Every structure is written in C-alpha cells, then in structure tokens.
Image (spheres, helix red, strand yellow):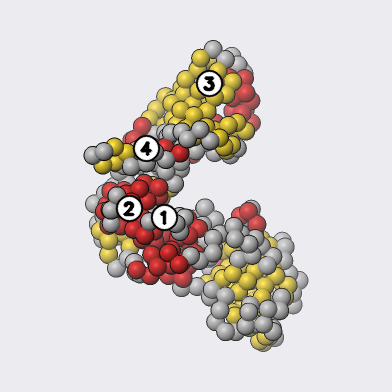
Amino acid sequence: VLIMTDGYQQIVHREVEISAAGGLRIEKKDGLEETAGNEKIKITKEDTGFQNGKIRIQAIDGGEITVSSIRRGYGNPSYAGTLDLYATSEGVVMVNELPLENYLCKVVPSEMPASYQKEALKAQAICARSYAYRQIMDYAYPEYQAHVNDSTDYQVYNNSASQQAATEAVQETAGKVLKYNGNIITAYYYSTSCGKTTTMAAWGTKEKAENAYLQSVEVKDQTGDYERNLPWYRWTVDVTAARLSTILYKNTGKDVGSIRKIYISKRGPGKVALELKVKGDKGNLTVKTENKIRSALAGDYDIRKQDGSKVKFRTLLPSAFITITKKKSQIHIRGGGFGHGIGMSQTGANEMAKQGKTYKEILKLFYSDITVEN
C-alpha cells in the first residue's frame, strides 16, 4: 500500500519521521541499524543508506511503526508489517507491506463507521476483501511494487484507527470473497442510495457479461426504501442562474453566458443522470457521465439535506441522481443519495442489518447472482 501525504495530496514525502514502541530495525546499504524504543528518526532522499534506492524498516518487537510526519483522521498513523522507503528526485515514497487481513482491519473502519451493525460491517469486510484481491492482480505503482494507495483512489486505509467491531467483522468473515461466474468481483460501494442503485453505465463503461453482477436494484422491502428516513436520502440545492453559470465556467472552462435552459438529457439505470445539457446566450455545454456531471455542478453553495441541515460540497455534488428545474433566474436541483450509486450502499446495508438481514442477504441484494466463497 503506497502511503500518501497529508490530505492524500501526493505520493512523495519531503521527509519521513518514524518510531516504534520497541524500537526499529532499519535495513540500509551498509547493513542493519537499530533504534531505541520510541526514538524518532527522520529519513530524507539524501540519506546515504538507500540501497538501490530503497530502505526497509520493521518494528523490532513485531509491533506497529508510527509515522509522525503525516496525519490521518485519528492523528499520527501507525502501520503493521514493514515500511519500504524509496528515494526519488523529489523526496521519499513510502510503501507499507502487510498481510491482507491486517490491511482490512484498518480499511473497514476507515470506509464504514465501526458503530454500524455487525452484519453491515461483515458485508463491508467482504466487499473490501474482494476489491483488494482484484487489486493484487496488478501493481498500481510497479516501480514501488505497490498494488494500491491508501486513498479513495482505491480503498481508504488507516484514516481511522483499528476498532474492535470492525476487526471482529474481518476475522469472522476471514477469507470470504464475492464471486460471479467463478471470478472474484470488483465490489464497488458508496455511502447512501436514493432508493435505487445504478450500473457501470454511469461511468460510461459498457455493460457486459463480466460486470453483469452490477445491476440497478431497488433498495427497499415491502414497507418502503430502507434509507427513506436518513438525511442524505433526499437533498436540494437552490442557486441563481448567474452564479451557476460562473460555477460551470470555473469547473468546465466553458462560458455559456446567461443560462437559458439546463436539463438532464440522458438517464441511465436507476434514473442516474448520464448527460447534462446547458444552453446559454454565449454557447452550449454538454457534460457526460455521473462523475463529470457532479464535478461540473459543484460549487460553494448550501446543500440542504432532508433533515434540514446544510453542508457545502465544493468539488463534487453528492450524487448524480438529480432533477434540475429553472424558474426565472433561480435553478433548483433535487437529488437523492450520496456517492456514485454503483454496488453496495453502506447506509442501506446498515438499515438492512437493523431489520435483521444477514450479511449474505445484504450482499445478494446489491450484487446480482453472486456467491460468497472462501
């Protein structure tokens, strides 16, 4: 796992400061060095110990290595396994190598609140494990022998400390993965559904036999949508046409001028927006795929959740399950859910677990015709 800098901004660290409660064993060009317990050391690209560009570090007692030069959601993170440091012209690249099950113990609480129901956490553990196994088949960073990084580019790792409930969910599902037609699936997941999920079509990817486990499904039982009472189930935005025109220009580089018409011109499974059209007095704009539509419409304005609370999302609209209406100089966006809408809704899984559904029942709702196997 390639460990990124603060805020997951980049892959190269200016310096790396590390320690371990029982001391460190550092494998350098000239042999082994050891540090005392809790002794902090700094390593920069100028360190003479890089052997073929690499330094390997382990905790002497087999415990975790604390990296005090970066911060995560819970403070300075600590890592099981080994840290491999690589010198580059800009600084140091840090890669954490550890057993996959240990990795999952810090993915699950970083991706889903550990306060969620046990069956939801088990479903999350199996999704995360399946996703990780798919990533092991290839190196995202071959030059550093790293399969993934620790950000939302793949799965968030170690932004939250280990939590007992999440660790138990990993241990109780140890080795279990999702398969479709005998192959481990890429188990996509996201925060909250609008009552429906969508397919890979939302990303402009052709729906084919290999990803047919990702169907548009209704996230409900006989009483209604599981998430209907949650804040993100429905949300709204009100913005002036003039302001939205400025936002569109900033996000897309296209100046449409005064907006005359704005609408969703194409929808995909689950009614997700696939194409946005804007007609203005200076020109027209077409934006395709859910992610680019969410990015184009994102601005420094209030998003009102259905519980009345307000938040701002400057870089991405909560979801592309939206309708847009223009009335005179005002534009109203009504949306549902939070995230891309493909695969498992995490709050949906939690609401299902509250209703007594098992992790297998949860997974079989969100991923069509899959099996849970070791």
Q: Residues within 10 Å of mark 4 (few under 14, many from 20)?
A: some
Q: Which residue appears at 68% of the width and 78% of the height?
A: 38
Element assignment for label 1: loop
322 in relation to 113, above or below: above
Ranked by sequence position, the earlier of labels 2 and 4 is: 4
How far is disc 1 from disc 3 in space, using C-alphas? 36 Å
How far is disc 1 from disc 4 in space, using C-alphas? 17 Å
Q: Residues within 10 Å of mark 3 (few under 14, many from 20)?
A: many
Ranked by sequence position, the earlier of labels 2 and 3 is: 3
Q: Amino acid at mark 3?
A: Ile
Between 290 and 163, which is closer to the camera in this rendering? Answer: 163
Coordinates of residue 212 in the picture (x, y in percent): 29, 47
Quadrant where the image shows the C terminus:
bottom left
Q: Are marks 1 and 3 in contact (CB under 8 Å)?
A: no
Coordinates of residue 45 in the picture (x, y in percent): 73, 69
Q: Amino acid at mark 4?
A: Arg
- Left or right position of 272 against 145: left
Disc number at residue 116? Answer: 1
Q: Are marks 2 and 4 in contact (CB under 8 Å)?
A: no
Looking at the image, is mark 2 or mark 3 nearer the viewer? 2
Residue that numbered label 2 is attached to: 353
Disc number at residue 331? Answer: 3
Q: Is residue 299 visible?
A: yes
How far is disc 2 from disc 4 in space, using C-alphas? 15 Å
Ranked by sequence position, the earlier of labels 1 and 3 is: 1
Residue that numbered label 4 is attached to: 228
